[in-house]
Amino acid sequence: MRAGRWILVGLAALAGGAPTPAGGQDGPGGPPVVVASKPFGESFLLAEMFAQLLEARGLRVDRRPGLGATEIAFAALRRGAIDVYPEYTGTGLLAILHQRPDPDPAAVYRRVSAEFLARYGVRWLPPLGFQNTYAIAVRRATADSLGLRTLSDLARAGPRLRAGLTADFIGRDDGLPGLARAYGLRFREVRALLPAVKYQALAAGGVDVIDGYSTDGLILKYDLTVLRDDRSFFPPYEAAAVVAPGLARRQPEAVAALTELSGRLSDAAMRALNRRVEVDGEPIPRVAAAALAALGLTTHAGAEAAAGRGLSAGPPVRDGLMAYLWAERRTLAALTARHLLLVAVSLAAAILVAVPLGLALERLKRGAEGVIRGVGVLQTIPGIALLAFMLPLLGIGVVPALVALFLYSLYPILRNTYTGVRTAAPDAVAAALALGMTPRQILRHVRLPLAAPLVMAGIRTAAVIDVGTATLAAFIGAGGLGEPIASGLALNDTRMILSGALPAALLALAVDALLGAGERLLKAGG
Amino acid sequence: MTAPPDGIALAARSVSKQFGNLTALDAVSLEVRRGECVALIGESGSGKTTLLRCFNRLTDPDAGLVLVDGTDVGRMDPVALRRRVGYVPQESGLLPHWRVQRNAALVPWLRGAPDAEAQGERALALVGLDPAAIGPRWPRDLSGGQRQRVAVARALAGQPDIVLLDEPFGALDAITRADLQGTVIELRRRLGFTALLVTHDLAEAFLLADRVGVMHSGRLEQVASPDELRRSPATGYVRTLLARARVAQ
């Protein structure tokens, strides 16, 4: 009961302590507009441009960058958990509406804007002006030696080549399956690669073919050859802002502000902006501010102010890791505190459930293994998938993150509690029974104290797993040290990844040491 | 009913127990007189431990009647019964996270006696252990013989009239076993409690018991004093058992 109250206190602290300038109360200009992105560089950049533009028009903004992927971002938008994020018409057509591709950009835009409004109440604002379609890329040397210029050429050479594709692309109908049908394409081998590593894998010769986006800055950096889609398989992917059902009603001025960007970004301009972010490593807020100023949408002074906020506006040349960590210390401290709270609250809840459940199962005996295995199955659900399942129920943010972490913490604690009370000194348990202890007394005075070290070990295991898993919280906008990890992965920025990963590792060690000390204290006391 | 009920501490009447296909007890009847020590002997699986466990309801028989001090144990609260009847298991079964003094005081503590600790200490002294020296130690710091002595003290701390001993010295070396056997003989002489002893050692049975019951395949083949058993074994099984144990001569 007392612990339950602490969980509430923890939740309240989490809700109040968001590192983003969210704020609970509605200030002038209505509630903040929640601007989100998917976890890759261009999406981050466009979302930041949306955010700065809204701020320049006097609206308050809550930034939720790097939401899981299409399913998570779109589900969040449908529910109104976020107000706007950048999406691509082709993705809307194929991945969300599950309709057949169409080569005509205008037709695709008309179709998605009509269908989204009818089905979900979601609006597509007029396109931003550039397309970012899939780009199948090879090393220039490969292209030259095999004479590859088009995807038809690739179909010829495919059986000799190894492909490294993002999991998204391998599964989507407008990805590998459709491409293979359209061109009769087969590869010697297909490997699933994270977006963050595929360019390096290609450059290093680990794979021969990758899927990229046509506006990726890294295509320029690694001097890759993009193969022409000579049969027009890929549908048009025009970028546009998609807007939640409620925003137009609530804050039409926000929709008006976002529309100012429509038609203003060309392919070349977007590729150059992406290059500044992905290759040169410039901070996203600064690139976004400069882009808006160049378009005449904000004043230069406003851009300077915007650039000063968020990521620190250091020189574009990359500093060393330590200097970076020092410069980001305030942000990192806030993220670490958030991370710790996520872990503490979910772990406390898991202890409150798993320990009594383990004890109850020991009494039950029959069926206990089944229940424990069932809980164990939860452990095998990938974090992102679990978050995606829960999204329709719990939305994004802190609550679903806590529920996911809670579910992941159950198994080690439950298993160890059950095994601990089960296997505790059978001779002593038998004698205690024979001399007249009641089952309850045996549990309380014999099994539980003897199982305590195993139970504690389970809690420590769960805590360390929790600290690691909590990095996933970033994908549903719950903050924590996963934020710089997700951004760093998307931007191919090792320094940024480490700025989240190192504190997370230290946190895991610290939490384990703390619980270890608690365990010794407990032992000394008992 | 040959003896008056007040003279019988433990009685089993046509007790049967089945574990799956295995017949552990097949209509066994036995009486243990007040102050008497009866040893049950037999191979593993002969049913001797099952019979002993019927007397503190660690096992409930399928058929038949089990009486303790003339009362049907089926009508008694098992927890209350167990707190009344002393019990010594083969492996001491001391609680590893309790100090010796707390282990010894277990039954008085369970009964809610205000002087439980003192009763435990008296019991330790009774079995020849110095409460001041041994009491504060942990079970793991004792030798096997000392642990078993503490187990005997624990069984006696509540001053029971009846003590059940389930192969209490089976795991000990010969010298330690002889020591403890001597202690039990001495304690019985001083305290006069009724004892039911399960053992696979015929020499131990003959040494400690007034009467010996030979069990075989769930049946009680013969119950008699050691002399009578030597003189006139009732069945072929008893004869072979005696011959094998070389105590017949």
Image: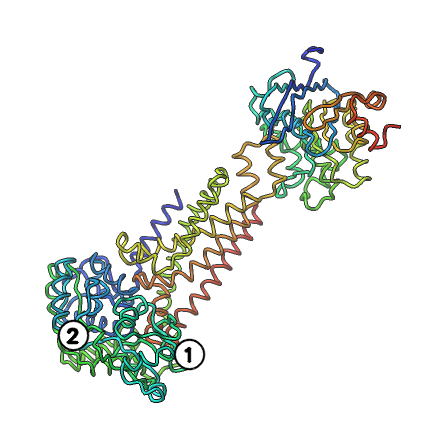
Snapshot quadrant of residue A62:
bottom left
Snapshot quadrant of residue A112:
bottom left
Q: Is residue A364 above or below residue A87?
A: above
- Please report, as a chain letter, where disc 2 is located: A
Observer able to see residue A314: no
Q: Which mark is residue B46?
A: none
Q: Is residue A192 above or below residue A287?
A: above
- Is A280 left or right of A261, judged from the image as shown? right
Q: Estimate the spatial distance between the alpha carbons at disc 1 and disc 2, rounded to whole Å.
A: 36 Å
Point out the image quarter for the C terminus of chain A: top right
Q: Position of residue A486 (x, y in %)?
A: 34, 69
Q: Is residue A302 above or below residue B203?
A: below
Query: The disc labelled 1 sits on which kind of residue?
Result: Gly
- Please report, as a chain letter, where disc 1 is located: A
Element carrying mark 1: loop
How many badges with numbers are in the image?
2
Q: Residue at 20%, 83% (x, y): give it.
A: A268
Q: Which residue is mark 2?
A: A128
Point out the image quarter for the N terminus of chain A: top left
Observer able to see residue A393: yes
Query: The disc labelled 2 sits on which kind of residue?
Result: Leu
Residue furthest toward the right? B249
Q: Are both tags, 1 and 2, on one chain?
A: yes
- Is B235 left or right of A406, judged from the image as shown? right
- Is A139 left or right of B120, judged from the image as shown? left
Q: How is the image coloured?
A: rainbow
Q: Which residue is mark 1?
A: A206
- Of A257 and A26, nearer the camera is A257
Q: Position of residue A426 (x, y in %)?
A: 61, 41
Q: Position of residue A251 (x, y in %)?
A: 12, 62
